[in-house]
Amino acid sequence: MPAETLRTVAGLAPPLRTLFLTTLIFRTGTMAYPFLTPYLLGRGGLEAAEAGLAVTTFGVGALAADLAAGRLLARLHPYALMRGGFLLGAAAVTVVPLLNGLPALITVVLIWGFAYEIVTPAAYAATIAGSPPEQRKVAFSCYRLAINLGLSAGPLLGALLYALDPHAVFWANALCVLAAAAFLHHCGERRPAAGPDAAVGGPGHGTRPRGPVRQTTAERTRFWSVFGLSLPIQLAYALPSVFVGAYVIVGLGLPGYWAGVVFTVNAVGIVLFEVPLNIRMARVGHLATLLSGYALGGTGFLLMALADSGPELVLATLVWTAGEIVVFPGLLAYVSRLSGPAADRNMGLYSGGVNLAFIAAPQLALHISAPGRPVGGRRSGGLRRLPAAARGPHQPVHLAQGETVLKRDLTPFIGVEYSGLTHAELTRPEVFADVVDSLHRRDLVVVRGIELTPRQQIGLAARIGRPVPFLLADWRHPEFAEILVSSNERKDGLPVGIERVGHFWHQDSSFDADPSAYTVLHGVHVPEDHGHTVFASAADVYDRLPEQWRTFLEDRVGLHTLTKQQRIAPEHVGLSIAEVRALIARQYPAVEHSVVRRDPHTGRRFLYAARAYMDRVVGLDANENEAFFDLVDTLLADPNRSYTHRWTPHDLLLWKTATTYHVATDLPPGVSRTVHRVSVAAA
């Protein structure tokens, strides 16, 4: 099969061979886009919502290109339009790392999306002009082969460059695009064309239409019928890239590497078999081709839904990959055939349909995997449900071995969730590095359902800093001083741990002169319907302060103390309240911290103040302090700006103590709960 594919590519007409190699170079340069979101969130300094908006404009630009393609191709040769797209795209990619500010980024990313996508309908036009109708399936399958080969190499090269220097991936992308433009310019000049209206090449294709193209009602009806019928299959094949990871790991409970196997089988199948199979189907009618492709695709996805094991997934993937190999070259050939003189415009619209499917796929995947919806196979009764509070779609994190870890933002303001991880997978360097990066950017990380021993929990904490014994020595774990046991359970009539910890909004250990930097909390025995924990971002609270308060609090310090929350101990019996407070003040002296601080990881200002652990803001009178604490309580009480963690067994939570407010909710009588907490000092 590979030898036949190579012979077919080598035997293409010179214009199509030029198009193949140009496409291969161009798609190999697709390095920057897969890393645009992490770049904008990290080096770009954008919030998640801002980065999402910037990335969305890429798709908007691409759709605009598809809609404009027909008019542009009526005036420009496909090669000229491709070169223009290359040059414009290279300029946009080069500029992205140099920009500051959301409006400029949105503008340039919009241009980048337009430039990137305009190449596709131009390449379709070149393929149509360079091949007779009976050879078009093979021609389109060769074009798709170049795309798949390039997209297999580009993101991998981009990952290597991004690890070395995030800026380098954009400039390498631009160089590849310029190389594609140069190659097309050099080889395209050899085409046997008489002028800008001439066909790209191939036998007997006359001239390209110029100016507006009129279609009959029957021609328009046929095209839009096929366009409408193509959308479901486009959407079906857009789903695996955003849904397979969640389905395999969360739905079926299989190891993450099986998701990587699915993607690998699909890619290898396309590379090895698409061209040979379409050679054999070159003279099969359009209807038979599309019906067989749809049937294979539907059967493959049905088998996917019924699969319970890795090998069954592989078999299902082979079947739906066969459908992909058949249906997409067949659709391209059929649309080009029925469009006649309007092929340029219609192929642009067809390409727009592909983009619409990829835009809709993440939303459909989120709907399918919403809580309460069975996304597992025959054994889906054992599916681990995703929490209702999780608001963003899962994004796959691809590992070096081809495995996939799923993560998603919990709210626009705070939190990232990972699912499907074991302790062994979490401790892999590339996975833990991603978790720590999420922790630093988003303040809170939730790892769903990961079983840990106390020693393993301490080991994970030690990878982000130095675990320290908790202040309340009476409630430390009997074997591990680093673990505070928070529990309302009893053993042999004695309490297992301390009850009712943190049932008020606070930032951990702010009463300490040198508070711990992180908290690592593991749900040992947790009810799923009660005892939730609510989190809020201290940076978001600061951002929502009225301007006059932000100005008023600048450079002020707060006096933090444990006296408001210290529990009555046996040694306090017989003392007055004033004497108890004085004793606690001597044991745990009040400390000062700046009320407004700056997060060293994100550069954002955040509020470091909460009523429960503070006596006052120094320099404010009693009325001003009360007004300030009331304001903070009001901001924290807004449910639209917080994340409520509804515990499931063995959840692991990590958060930055300074930038994260949280509060534990009450448990009803008779409901037991035990969690293990490790405080972590900065390394």
Image (cartoon, rainbow, N blue to C red):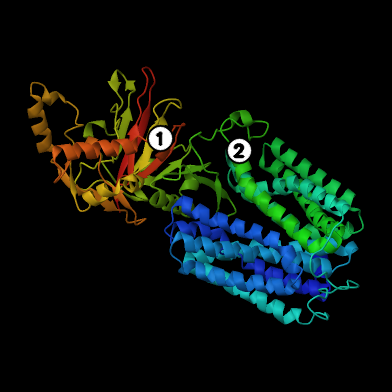
Q: Position of residue 256 (x, y in %)?
A: 58, 46
Secondary-structure class at tag 2: helix
Q: Closer to the camera, 600 or 352? A: 352
Q: Identify the image quadrant of residue 472.
A: top left
Question: Residue at the location (71% across, 35% down)?
Answer: 306
- Which residue appears at 81% of the width and 45% of the height? 294
Q: Are marks 2 and 1 in contact (CB under 8 Å)?
A: no
Mark 1 secondary-structure assignment: helix
Q: Which is nearer the N-term, disc 2 or disc 1?
A: 2
Quadrant containing the C terminus is: bottom left
Quadrant of the image containing the N terminus: bottom right
How would you rate the neighbour count of disc 2 (Cα within 10 Å): few for under 14, some for 14-19, many for 20 or more?
Answer: few
Dot 1 amino acid type: Pro
Observer-nearest of 573 and 479: 573
Quadrant of the rendered structure where residue 473 is? top left
**Observer able to see residue 620:** yes
Residue 102 left/right relative to 249: left
Give the residue type at disc 2. His
Mark 2 → mark 1, Cα distance in angstroms: 23 Å
Q: In the visual, does 308 lie left or right of 400?
A: right
Q: Counting other residues with Cα less than 10 Å from the Cα at mark 1, is it few (<14), some (14-19), or many (20 or more)?
A: few
Q: Which residue is mark 2?
A: 367
Q: Is residue 262 visible?
A: no
Report x, y in % for residue 344: 78, 63
Q: Position of residue 221 (x, y in %)?
A: 84, 49
Q: Position of residue 192 (x, y in %)?
A: 83, 80
The residue sitting at 43% across, 64% down in the picture is 100
Residue 314 sits above or below residue 355 on the image: above
Which residue is denoted by mark 1 in the rendering? 639
